[in-house]
Image: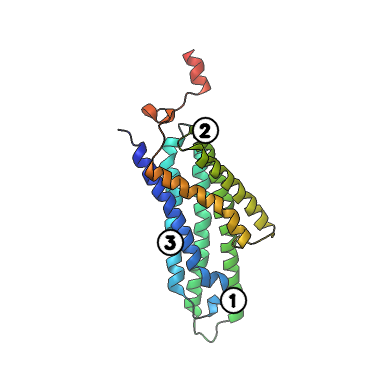
Amino acid sequence: MNLSRPTAVITGILFLLTEVGAIAGAALYGPVLSGANYITSAGADQAILLGALFELILVGAAVGTAVTLYPVLKRQNEGLALAYVAARVLEAAAILVGILSLLSIVTLRRQFAGTAEADMASLTTVGSSLVALHDWTFLFGPGFALGAGSLLLASLMYSSRLVPRAIAVLGLAGGGLILLSAVAVMFGLYGQMSTIGLVVALPVFAWEVSLAVWLIAKGFRPVPILSSGGTRPTAARVSLQQ
């Protein structure tokens, strides 16, 4: 039974879930990320918790895309396919640390809310530190790791022709740009959520959405690596056959 079509559809859905989770999480985290004194204020905990839930969906979907694609991609290049899995897992781990940092703020706000003995200045410092930790995880997860993963996946898609090469080229461009942008943000040239940062992130967003739509609507293109469920012959195997 040829399972390439269900694999393509599942992968496409997972990619769309990553976008939904990322956008919803960023929107719902607004109060805690923009307010340095959130930890000592009335708070909007339900929005933060809902944002964490969406990002947990993002984490699961991100790892899911790599795990689902691995059996197909390893037929093209097992090393690069495994590297893509590693990049996705690293991205998910960074995002998970960011989630925990913001949930810690919610816990501390609830624990010390209304207590006269609480040191508000110290709490504000702790809250700012946890937000800073989230900001760095956001840079290394949906920045460096996402860029590296996009380059790996796009290169595999380009060489295998599983999807149209125009989509793969968009992934190569988007992955490269988001990596360069992460470096620029790290050195303080602009903010990751600034206008420039968001504009630079558009190509990688377009890459993932176009890839998802193609996989759901069309599936993988009929290429040699899908036939007979076999891998591409290695140099050693060709030598033995000769």
Amino acid residing under circle 1: Thr
**Label 2 sits on what residue type?**
Ser
Would you name the residue on which mark 2 appears? 159
Q: What residue is rendered at 47% in x and 77% in y?
A: 110
Front label number (2 vs 3): 2
Give the camera-side residue of 210 and 71. 210
> What amino acid type is highlighted by mark number 3?
Phe
Q: Earlier in the sequence, mark 2 or mark 3?
A: 3
- How far is mark 2 from mark 3, CA to CA? 33 Å
Vertical placement of 107 versus 166: above or below?
A: below
Gap between marks 1 and 3, in whole Å?
26 Å
For discs 2 and 1, the disc positioned in front in the rendered view: 2
What SS does tag 3 mark?
Answer: helix
Query: Is residue 162 positioned above or below 29 on the image?
Result: above
Depth check: give the residue in front, 141 or 3.
3
Give the farthest residue toward the left. Answer: 1
Which mark is first along the chain, 1 or 2?
Answer: 1
Residue in the foreground of this view, choosing between 28 and 236:
28
Question: Which residue, given by chain and number where applicable, does mark 3 sit on?
Answer: 54
Relative vertical location of residue 239 with respect to residue 180 in this rendering, above or below: above
Circle 2 crowding by C-alpha within 10 Å: few under 14, some 14–19, many from 20: few
Q: Is residue 117 left or right of residue 186?
A: left
Query: Callout 3 environment at 10 Å: few (<14), some (14 to 19), or many (20+)?
Result: many
Separation of disc 2 and disc 1 at Cα? 51 Å
Place residue 191 in its image quadrant.
bottom right
Element assignment for label 1: helix
Question: Measured from the top left, where is residue 208 in percent x and y?
Answer: 48, 48
Quarter of the image that includes the N terminus: top left
Q: Position of residue 104 (x, y in %)?
A: 50, 69
Residue receiving disc 1: 124
